Image: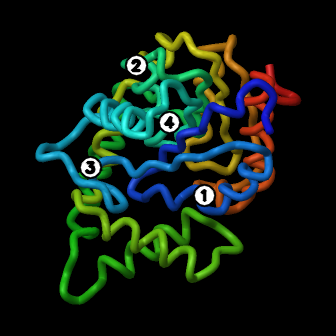
Amino acid sequence: MRPGSASLPLVLLHQSPMSARQFEAALQPLATRGIRCIAVDTPGFGESDPTRFVPRIEDWASSIVAVLDHLDISQADMLGHHTGALLATEVALQAPGRVRRLILNGPFPASESERRQYLEAMEAGREESEPALDGLHLVRSFALRLKMYGRGAEPALITRYVVQKYQCLAPHWYGHNAAFHYDHAASIARLAHRTLILTNTGDDIFGISKRAAALRPDFAYREMQGGTHDIVDQRPEEWAAIVAGFLDDGAVDGAR
């Protein structure tokens, strides 16, 4: 068991547009290191109910706190990947006493102009991803996820990613829309929790994520080599070892 932290679970918050299944490959590696994991679907994704409006990251935070309340968990460690990293940050800001340690895997402290460009690109591509009777939206989504994953992709895994995108009960673009409207740089500056910035050099937002380390040199920082957008599936053992090391000690080998 983890010294001094056996009673604290780790809440896992996924990227968009996926679900809690994003962490499936890492659950056993984390469990063998004594970590109790609770992977949560963001509202509207996976099998969770959507909001009745177009949500922002700030709107979702109370739902994560509600999960803790329902499970009678007074405090937890929290990890988020991509959109999940933004959500984990907001939970820590809105309910600071409910979070012990924080792991931001792929943070997004983009500038306002960069976020505007991401939003414009998302809007431009929305029509091609809308369901159509010829099924081309599935073909396009498969090709995009295959490119994002990189070499060594398995057909069943890429299929799962695409299915998660279209099975959600909210429009799949809600997640990226919320992420690109969120000023993560400003939120990171306000954090008071012991935090690990985790990224990997092959991630498509690696350059932006690395800025978080410059914004908060007091945070621990770990940079995995290679990998892509889907580092959790690609290197679950290495990823879990870094996560567990930080939660046990508040630091990781080779980190600041």
Q: Residue at x 75, y 22 (%)?
A: 250
User: What residue is disc 4 on?
Assistant: 85
Task: Kindly identify which numbered label has been placed on residue 107.
Answer: none
Q: Which one is earlier in the sequence, the residue at label 1 or at label 2?
A: 2
Q: Nearer the viewer, residue 252 or 69?
A: 69
Q: Which one is earlier in the sequence, the residue at label 1 or at label 4?
A: 4
Q: Are marks 2 and 3 in contact (CB under 8 Å)?
A: no
* Residue 130, picture quadrant: bottom left
- In whole angstroms, how far apart are the C-alphas of marks 4 and 2? 15 Å
**Which amino acid lies under the numbered mark 1 shown in the image of this protein?**
Asp
SS class, disc 2: loop
Residue 213 placement (x, y as % from top left): 65, 22
**Which amino acid lies under the numbered mark 4 shown in the image of this protein?**
Ala
Q: Residue at x 64, y 74 (%)?
A: 153
Q: Residue at x 30, y 48 (%)?
A: 43
Q: Compared to 11, does 212 lie above or below?
A: above
**Which amino acid lies under the numbered mark 3 shown in the image of this protein?**
Tyr
* Residue 87, picture quadrant: top left
Instruction: Determine crowd level at label 4: few under 14, some 14-19, many 20+ residues with C-alpha closer than 10 A.
Output: many
- In whole angstroms, how far apart are the C-alphas of marks 2 and 3? 23 Å
User: What residue is disc 2 on?
Assistant: 95
Task: Kindly identify which numbered label has been placed on residue 230.
Answer: 1
User: What residue is disc 3 on?
Assistant: 174
- In whole angstroms, how far apart are the C-alphas of marks 1 and 4? 14 Å
SS class, disc 4: helix
Q: Is residue 250 left or right of residue 7?
A: right
Camera-nearest label, 4 or 2: 2
Camera-nearest label, 1 or 2: 2
